[in-house]
Structure formats: C-alpha cells, structure tokens
Image (cartoon, rainbow, N blue to C red):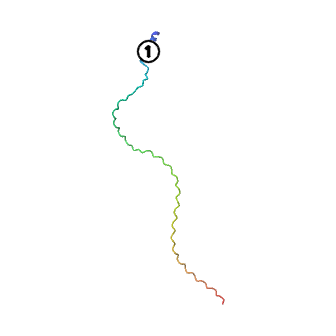
Amino acid sequence: MKTTLLLATMLATLGLCACNPAPSNQPVVVVPGPAGATGATGATGTTVAVPGATGATGATGATGNDGNTGNTGNTGATGATGNSGATGAPGYDGAKGDT
C-alpha cells in the first residue's frame, strides 16, 4: 500500500508539472490597428451663472501728504472818507494885559 500510494503521488506530481509549463519571458508586442471613425460631437454643457465668493477687503491706504499753503488774498478796497467833525466850543476870553 505504501508503494502504491508513493507511485500514485509521483505520477500525479509529474502530470501536474507537465501541464504547467515554465513562463516565457518573451515581450508582447502590440501593433495598433487602423484608426476608427471619428465619434459624434458631445452635447454642449449648460452655463450656470453662479458668482464666486467675494474677495477680501483690501488694506487701507496710507495717509496723504499735507497740501500746499494757499495764495495770499488781494488787498481790500480803501474805505470811504469819514464825516467832518462837529464845530468846537468857543474859547475863553484871554487875560487882560498890563497897561
């Protein structure tokens, strides 16, 4: 029985080895065939008007320089002549001299 089992195992091993040949390392060369006909044009995509997010606020600009001094104004017109003054009060009689 041992011999029969051993002989059966040997024959099965040889049979399996014969059915599974060693792999070949030959490169596979793919030759492309002729090009096929051009396919149909695809449908136009839909336009979606969805605005993007608002951008961040920019930085505040620097303070501007002081402006130049303005020009001097024109000289004003001469004023009108004033009214004449009131007549003065009569003077005192002078002292009498020595004769």
Question: Closest to the observer: 99 or 19?
Answer: 19
Residue type for callout 1: Leu
Please tell me how crowded label 1 is: few (under 14), some (14-19), or many (20+) other residues with Cα within 10 Å: few
Question: Closest to the observer: 23 or 52?
Answer: 23
Residue lying furthest right in this view?
Answer: 98
For disc 1, the marked residue is 14
Q: Secondary structure at mark 1?
A: helix
Q: Which residue occupies 46% across, 9% down?
A: 3
Question: Closest to the observer: 39 or 32?
Answer: 32
> Which picture quadrant has residue 11?
top left
> Which picture quadrant has residue 40?
top left
Q: Position of residue 6 (x, y in %)?
A: 46, 11
Q: Position of residue 5 (x, y in %)?
A: 45, 11
Q: Is residue 66 above or below residue 99?
A: above
Name the side, left or right, on which 38 lies relative to 13: left
Q: Which residue occupies 45% across, 13% down?
A: 10
> Which picture quadrant has residue 41?
top left
In the picture, the quarter occupied by the C terminus is: bottom right
Name the side, left or right, on which 45 lies relative to 75: left
Residue lying furthest bottom in this view?
Answer: 99
Q: Position of residue 67 (x, y in %)?
A: 52, 58
